[in-house]
């Protein structure tokens, strides 16, 4: 899943941006129903620079780690895997970045 498209609208690609946003929102919402049953969720985004390649082993290893880590902080997280074979976890709380941050901050202010 392209997490950039889920955070920001892509001009002239409304359907793609909307579908990516829906996937991220569904993952975030389903966590509440599935986590008590031991079912994990996550989104993976790959990115390669011009002179980089992406290792299938690294992508598979990231998926396996996200699915089996004993740390439930990895549940409903995003994973960025780059061409230099680095995997970076984007914690679920960080998904409020981008256009959702203003709405999130205002909502938090209202409920406090």
Image (spheres, grey):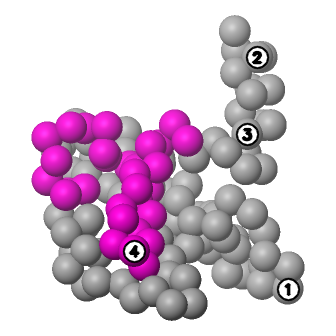
Residue 99 — which label?
none
**Between 26 and 102, the one nearer to me in the picture:** 102
Tell me the mark number nearer the camera, choosing from 4 and 1: 4
- In this rendering, the answer to whether 39 lies above or below 102 is below
For disc 4, the marked residue is: 84
Image location (x, y in percent) of residue 91: 44, 43
**Spatial CA span between label 2 and label 4:** 40 Å
Residue 108 lies in what quarter of the image?
A: top right
* Discs 3, 1 touching: Cβ within 8 Å: no
Which is nearer the N-term, disc 2 or disc 1? Answer: 1
SS for dot 4 = loop
Residue 99, horizontal then vertical, whole percent: 77, 50
Picture residue at 70% right of the left edge, 14% below the top = 111
Q: In the displayed structure, does residue 11 sit left or right of residue 31?
A: right
Determine contact: label 2, label 1, CB under 8 Å: no
Highlighted range, magenta = 65-94
The residue tagged 1 is 12
Q: Is residue 27 highlighted in magenta? A: no
Numbered label attached to residue 101:
3
**Of marks 3 and 4, which one's residue comes earlier in the chain?**
4
Q: State the SS at label 2.
A: helix
Residue 93 falls inside the magenta stretch: yes
């Amino acid at each position: 899943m392209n997490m950039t498209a889920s955070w920001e609208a892509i001009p002239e690609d409304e359907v793609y941006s909307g579908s990516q946003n829906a996937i991220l929102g569904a993952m975030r919402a389903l966590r509440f129903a599935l986590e008590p049953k031991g079912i994990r969720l996550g989104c993976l985004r790959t990115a390669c620079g011009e002179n980089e390649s992406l290792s299938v082993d690294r992508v598979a290893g990231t998926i396996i780690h996200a699915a089996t880590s004993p740390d439930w902080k990895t549940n409903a997280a995003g994973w960025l895997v780059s061409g230099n074979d680095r995997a970076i976890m984007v914690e679920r709380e960080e998904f409020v970045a981008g256009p959702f941050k203003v709405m999130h901050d205002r909502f938090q202010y209202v409920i406090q």
